[in-house]
Image (spheres, rainbow, N blue to C red):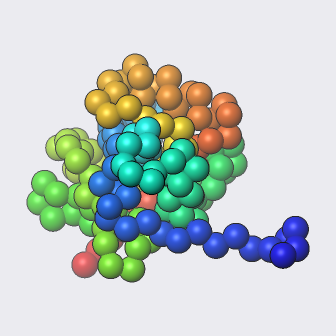
């Protein structure tokens, strides 16, 4: 295999996605536009055969499938990947048969997205402990962005 060989990472299935941690929030800046956020990470390895490396490969499969870019680069528009049905929101993360349900997005988050507002999608490669509060999420984001371990893209709601 040559040095320039293309790496193809599979999009993980629902078993992997079930181990992901997801945080959502809305930032309503005084001068900046309102933006909905989605942060996806993964808990530390805990299932049989799961390693830090296999978790990172799964997350990078999602990054590749959604065409996310490193957080230090300009945030790309990755298409309409959010599906909303009442209070339920799902993300088309690139798997041909499954979506990822986003937990507890909140009424303001859904209202913003339903009105056509953008959502900034971030995948962090470092482990995120389940139940991390706002301060822990903020510290996590600062760390993964500073160490080039975060990938981002802008998405919107998908029309029927």
How many numbered marks does the figure carry?
A: 0
Q: Indicate left or right for 84 with 43 as reference.
A: left
Within the image, what quadrant is residue 107 found in? top left
Q: Is residue 72 above or below residue 56?
A: above
Q: Indicate left or right for 20 with 120 as reference.
A: left
Q: Closest to the observer: 116 or 49?
A: 49
Residue 45 visible = yes
> In the image, what residue occupies the spot 46% across and 26% down?
138
Instruction: Name the residue furthest top.
Output: 135
Instruction: Name the residue furthest front.
Output: 48
> Residue 128: where, in percent of width, then height?
43, 35
> In the image, what residue occupies the spot 40% across and 19% down?
135
Q: Indicate left or right for 137 with 109 as reference.
A: right
Q: Is residue 83 above or below residue 132?
A: below
> Residue 133: where, in percent of width, then height?
32, 24
Q: Quadrant of the C terminus?
A: bottom left
Within the image, what quadrant is residue 24 found in? top left
Residue 82 visible = no
> Residue 90: where, in percent of width, then height?
27, 61
Q: Is residue 84 above or below residue 54?
A: below
Q: Quadrant of the N terminus?
A: bottom right
> In the image, what residue occupies the spot 32% across and 34% down?
130
> In the image, what residue occupies the spot 34% across and 27% down?
132
């Amino acid at each position: 295999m040559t040095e320039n060989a293309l790496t193809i990472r599979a999009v993980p299935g629902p078993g992997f996605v079930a181990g992901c941690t997801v945080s959502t929030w809305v930032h309503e800046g005084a001068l900046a536009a309102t933006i909905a956020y989605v942060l996806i990470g993964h808990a530390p390895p805990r299932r049989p055969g799961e390693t830090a490396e296999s978790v990172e490969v799964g997350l990078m499969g999602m990054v590749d499938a959604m065409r996310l870019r490193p957080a230090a680069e300009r945030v790309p528009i990755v298409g309409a990947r959010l599906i909303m049905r009442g209070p339920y929101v799902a993300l088309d993360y690139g798997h041909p048969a499954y979506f990822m349900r986003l937990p507890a997005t909140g009424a303001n988050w859904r209202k913003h997205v339903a009105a056509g507002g953008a959502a900034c999608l971030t995948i962090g490669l470092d482990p995120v402990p389940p139940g991390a509060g706002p301060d822990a999420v903020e510290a996590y984001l600062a760390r993964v962005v500073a160490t080039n371990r975060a990938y981002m893209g802008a998405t919107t709601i998908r029309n029927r």
